[in-house]
């Protein structure tokens, strides 16, 4: 009974460390604005895919993160810069929506739109499983590598993996529920939200860039 209690408490610690950084509540407005025109079934599918991809990405970095980054010679600062560029690019596209300039003859039917493309980028990565979440997971992996007992190391990896799974489940619940906001806001409200979220995403992307450049020592004074 004591083992179960300790096991559960460690899992909750992992969730408590990941959720504030993954912050699905800040991703929810982006999810709503980017799935405008999608059916309820499509939005639920995208929410599920995004959360699943989040789990896969973080689990891979838990197990192989250091090896992957070292193999390609990528630093965490470079990863932050890359994430910032992706987020900022998505933000610019949302602010300066090119679809406004298209003729009616060029409109694409909802059935032909592949909304699932946004499930991995930018929703799962770098929003839900961005540089911050990856850093947390890799720091946990580093601590587990210092554990002398092989059995305790395996248990530690199981605990963190379960914590990641629960965090992904919470993100799925938040994104799935955010779909109901579409009916509340209406088309004009969604359009306005898209512009605002695009602007905020550019800001988030710039913050990622600043953090990455600061980590490289380029912006030591910021």
Image (cartoon, rainbow, N blue to C red):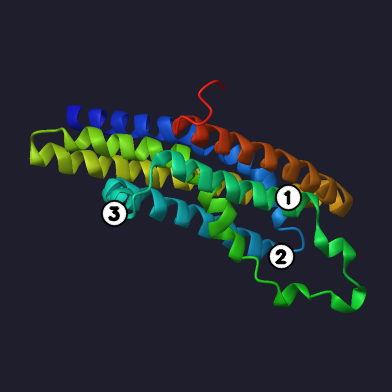
Q: Judge whether 116 appears above or below 180 on screen.
A: below
Name the residue carrying label 3.
71
Q: CA distance from mark 3 to mark 2?
A: 42 Å
Q: Earlier in the sequence, mark 3 or mark 2?
A: 2
Quadrant housing the C terminus? top right
Residue drawn at the location 81% of the way across and 61% of the way down: 98
Give how far apart the Cα atoms at labels 2 and 1 are. Answer: 25 Å
- Residue 214, horizontal then vertical, whole percent: 50, 30
Q: Nearer the viewer, mark 1 or mark 3?
A: 3
Q: Position of residue 11 (x, y in %)?
A: 32, 35
> Which residue has dot 1 on it?
92
Horizontal placement of 116 versus 82: left or right? right
Which mark is nearer the camera, 2 or 1? 1
Give how far across and how far down residue 144 sits, in percent. Answer: 21, 36
Q: Nearer the viewer, residue 162 or 8?
A: 162
Residue at x 44% of width, y 38% of height: 77
């Amino acid at each position: 009974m004591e083992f179960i209690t300790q096991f559960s408490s460690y899992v909750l610690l992992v969730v408590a460390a990941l959720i504030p950084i993954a912050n699905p509540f800040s991703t929810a407005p982006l999810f709503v604005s980017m799935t405008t025109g999608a059916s309820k079934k499509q939005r639920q599918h995208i929410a599920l895919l995004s959360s699943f991809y989040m789990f896969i990405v973080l689990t891979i970095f838990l197990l192989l993160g250091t090896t992957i980054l070292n193999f390609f010679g990528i630093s965490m600062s470079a990863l932050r810069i890359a994430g910032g560029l992706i987020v900022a690019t998505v933000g610019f596209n949302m602010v300066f929506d090119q679809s406004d300039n298209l003729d009616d003859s060029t409109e694409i039917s909802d059935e032909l739109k592949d909304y699932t493309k946004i499930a991995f980028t930018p929703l799962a990565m770098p929003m839900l499983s961005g540089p911050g979440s990856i850093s947390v997971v890799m720091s946990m992996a580093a601590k587990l590598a210092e554990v002398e007992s092989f059995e305790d190391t395996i248990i530690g990896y199981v605990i963190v993996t379960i914590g990641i799974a629960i965090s992904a489940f919470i993100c799925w619940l938040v994104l799935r529920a955010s779909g109901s906001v579409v009916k509340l806001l209406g088309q004009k409200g969604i359009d306005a939200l898209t512009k605002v979220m695009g602007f905020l995403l550019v800001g988030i992307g710039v913050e990622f860039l600043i953090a990455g450049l600061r980590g490289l020592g380029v912006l030591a004074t910021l």
